[in-house]
Amino acid sequence: MKTQASRLQELVNKRGVPAREQKRNLEAITSVSYEGVRQWFAKDMNTISGAALDKIARVYHCRLEWLISGTGEMDAGDSYTNGRETGKSARKVPVLSCVEAGSPKQIVDAYLAGAGMSEISIDRELEQGLSAESFALVISGDSMAPEYLEGDIVVVDPSVKPWPGDVVVGLLSTDNEATIKKYRSRGNDNDGHHFFELVPINPDYHTITVSSANPGHIVGTVVEHRRNLRRRR
């Protein structure tokens, strides 16, 4: 019988992640240490935490129940597979102006339906839990490489409260600037105010601390990632 680790290996292979990048990608997605990820495969584990598997399922668009127990099909209507018919839906969300995966960049008000430059269709599975305020953004910059690259599209839901390690769009109040980063809660300061960090995956970029000294808020949590498979060279 296949283990969670063997199904996870099957998933990243099918998504086309190069072998040399697989463990680092999983480390970035789950916030589990590289050594912890390595142990999943070395020990062929069947007890990987549900929180880690949930984050992997979101990013790689597979069914969580398949990762956990092998029940049902792997795919959950994602944009990675080529030539597969996904569930159709009449629901569309607006695609707003680019958000930087690098230095923050100003974007239009993400809550106003109809403000988008275009629209994208949402598959039925994602549609079920998607709020009316959801929208899509095109990524520019490389601070979230190699997982999120220039030209990729992310679907963002403002109603989803982020977990540590989730990818979010954060807005800095001082300059009304937004950026896409991983969310890391830092608890409360001495005055009882919550503060958090916006963390890049690319180590060449710095972490942004959002606090009373550098105010801002989370615009929304990324709930779908659509990889741009044809990039300009």
Image: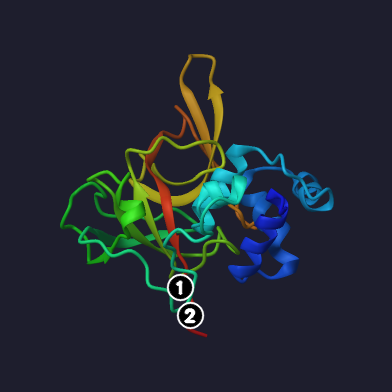
- Image mark for residue 114: none
Question: Viewed as shown, does residue 79 lie left or right of 52?
Answer: left
- In the image, residue 18 above or below residue 137: below
Q: Residue at x 78, y 53 (%)?
A: 41
Residue type pointed to by label 2: Arg
What residue occupies the far front of the structure in this picture? 1
How many callouts does the rendering have? 2
Residue 50 lies, in percent from the top left, at 60, 38
Q: Residue furthest bottom?
A: 233
Q: Amino acid at mark 1?
A: Asn
Pick the residue in front: 118 or 206.
118
Determine the residue located farthest toward the left in the rendered image. Answer: 114
Tell me the distance, in whole angstroms, between the alpha carbons under discs 1 and 2: 7 Å
> In this figure, which residue is indicated by the disc labeled 2?
231
What numbered label is drawn on residue 228? 1
The spot of residue 167 in percent (x, y) is 49, 48
Picture layout, residue 21 above or below residue 71: below
Quarter-wise, where is residue 185 in the image? top right
